[in-house]
Amino acid sequence: MTHEIKTIAVGFDGSLPAEAAVRWAFTLARPLEAEVVLVHAVGLLGHLEGEDVTSEFHDAVARLAHECNFDIGHVSWQIEDGNSTSVLMRASGQPVHADLIVVGSRGKSAHAGLMLGSTSLQLAERSTIPVMIVPYDR
Amino acid sequence: MLIVNAPVDDGGHEEHGHPERPARLAAAMAGVADLHLGDDLLVVDARPATRPELIRVHEATYLDELGVFCYEGGGDIDQDTYATYDSWAIAQRAAGAGLAVIDELRDRGDGVGFVAVRPPGHHALRDRAMGFCLLNNVAVAASSLTAIGERVMIVDWDVHHGNGTQAIFWNDPDVLYVSTHQWPLFPGSGGAREIGGLGALGATLNVPLPAGTTGDVVRQAFEELALPTIERFDPTWVLISAGFDAHADDPMADLALSGGDFAWLARSVGACAPGPGRVAVFLEGGYDLRALQHSVSSSLAALMDVDFDAEAPTSGGAGANEVRHAQSERRVAMRMADQDI
């Protein structure tokens, strides 16, 4: 049984671990001719930041696409209210229909359950589609 | 009689520029002072919640991790939530404050409780801090009551859905969780089809409301949707997760309620208690200090039936269709659940 990867969802919050995840997603998507959807979870504080909460990330994403020789035309955004785990969990359904989720991990942490890294742990445990965890090594 | 916990020294739980800040608690207490209650105000000591009391709603490993994380200096837990060296002790006292207030209410068999604490609690999950919340204060209190055989209703009128409280009591038939909240908005949960787990079908009731919703719609939601469920549940205690960020002036969201709307809600929710001494209000959100102070006064005055010049109730905004839709969605979910059993 084969599984075609047409859409890759990547959790993106502008952090360095998230950038590492986007690099992997772009690198993987290019030979597969897959679409990449950058999934951004809007937290409580996001409401204070105005309408387009991802505008500050556009330059970084363009730079990453250039580095990975990936066509930015195959990149889109999915912005949803919620915590990052629940928003990424929903990426397997409408409207993203992701076949793979890619997330960055902060790597070694004495408190992996508390820190952002727990998003990757929870996804690995609960996701109904494959999850790729990209460790970020400072 | 208003029974309030003694102020928890919360100054150590602060991050520069963060809206969940000590000034919120000062504003809430100013709201109490504005009622000029005199001898009708009783302040009780807030003790730290014990580990057995916390373990009823939180996983032991989470409590250990949070404690050590704070002991080592704390930091950002997620994009919204922080902890400091002092946060563990402050959060323990915040959770314990609710228990102390409820103990006093039980001893007296009279009065209204106000648990004025921060950080807030209703987003905190069994195993995770989120949405400014570290420990789920209202859940710790509710579980202390169900442990002695009480049937507890939690009404959550914070503008954000209390995903943590809902999840903690998802399968508990002794806790009815009722929430009105803006949707879509953080944390993304709280759909009308979320009705509780197999062990407690119907014991979760969500009314998601659009931006611009006014008080008349919230009143409609309470009377048409919530009240029949509440009457069937027949609570022996009523706890209110009272966030005041649904006020029109609050910067964190876009509902359009007033002090008068919170007063109506408080009066109506309080009337669901079977007798005196069985209502406690827990401070959750609310980030505009003036609106917070006024809304605390308005709500507590309504619960205690004392005079206070609250803002006028609001009407004419959005949301009536969404309430009808929520009612229909809930019916569908209940029917589907019945077929699955």
Image (cartoon, coloured by chain):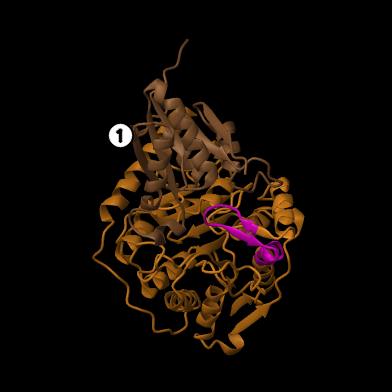
| Quadrant position of residue B334 | top left
Residue B147: image x %, image y %?
A: 69, 53
Q: Residue at x 52, y 66 (%)?
A: B18
**Magenta-drawn stretch contains B128:** no
Relative to B119, is A72 on the left or the right?
left
The disc numbered 1 marks a residue on which chain?
A: A
Residue position for label 1: A73
Which colour denotes chain A? brown
Q: Is any part of residue B198 visible from this angle?
A: yes
| Nearest to the observer: residue B13 or residue B285 | B13
Q: Is residue B92 above or below residue B127?
A: below
Relative to B268, is B148 on the left or the right?
right
Q: Residue at x 57, y 56 (%)?
A: B152
Amino acid type of the residue tagged 1 in the rendering: Gly
Q: Which residues are magenta?
A: B75-94
Residue A11: image x %, image y %?
A: 47, 40
* Quarter of the image with the N terminus of chain B in it: bottom right
